[in-house]
Image (cartoon, rainbow, N blue to C red):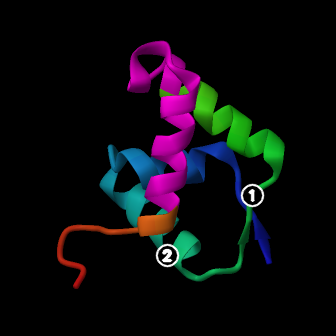
């Protein structure tokens, strides 16, 4: 099992750097990724403060992160 850091999850969710996003996707979809609570909290912080997701609503940013990780849908996926 691999321990994820916030950058992996932010790249996976935002897809703002294709090379890193694809590497993150591989890690996430492998099913062997462990996300500590502290890392998840950092992801929510980054989505809220840096990317302005949820207009400051932490619950929205948290929901966005969880949905992205659960759905794992990318263009071209079937």
Residue beneath disc 2: 26
Q: CA distance from mark 2 to mark 1?
A: 15 Å
35 vs 27, nearest the viewer: 35
What residue range appears in magenta? 48-69
The residue at the point 37 percent across, 59 percent down is 19
Q: Are marks 2 and 1 in contact (CB under 8 Å)?
A: no
* Nearest-to-viewer mark from 2 and 1: 1
Where residue 37 sits in the image (x, y, percent)? 81, 46
Residue 35 badge? 1
Residue at 41 percent across and 24 percent down: it is 54
Q: Is residue 52 visible?
A: no
Whether residue 57 is situated above or below residue 70 in the rendered picture? above
Figure quadrant of the C terminus: bottom left
Q: Which is nearer the eye, 22 or 29?
A: 29
In screen coordinates, is 61 left or right of 35?
Answer: left
The x and y percentages for residue 61 are 50, 33
């Amino acid at each position: 099992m691999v321990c994820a850091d916030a950058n992996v999850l932010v790249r996976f969710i935002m897809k703002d750097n294709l090379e890193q996003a694809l590497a993150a996707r591989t890690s996430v979809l492998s099913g062997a990724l462990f996300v500590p609570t502290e890392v998840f909290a950092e992801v929510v912080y980054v989505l809220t403060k840096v990317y302005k997701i949820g207009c400051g609503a932490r619950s929205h940013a948290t929901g966005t992160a969880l949905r992205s990780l659960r759905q794992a849908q990318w263009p071209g996926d079937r």
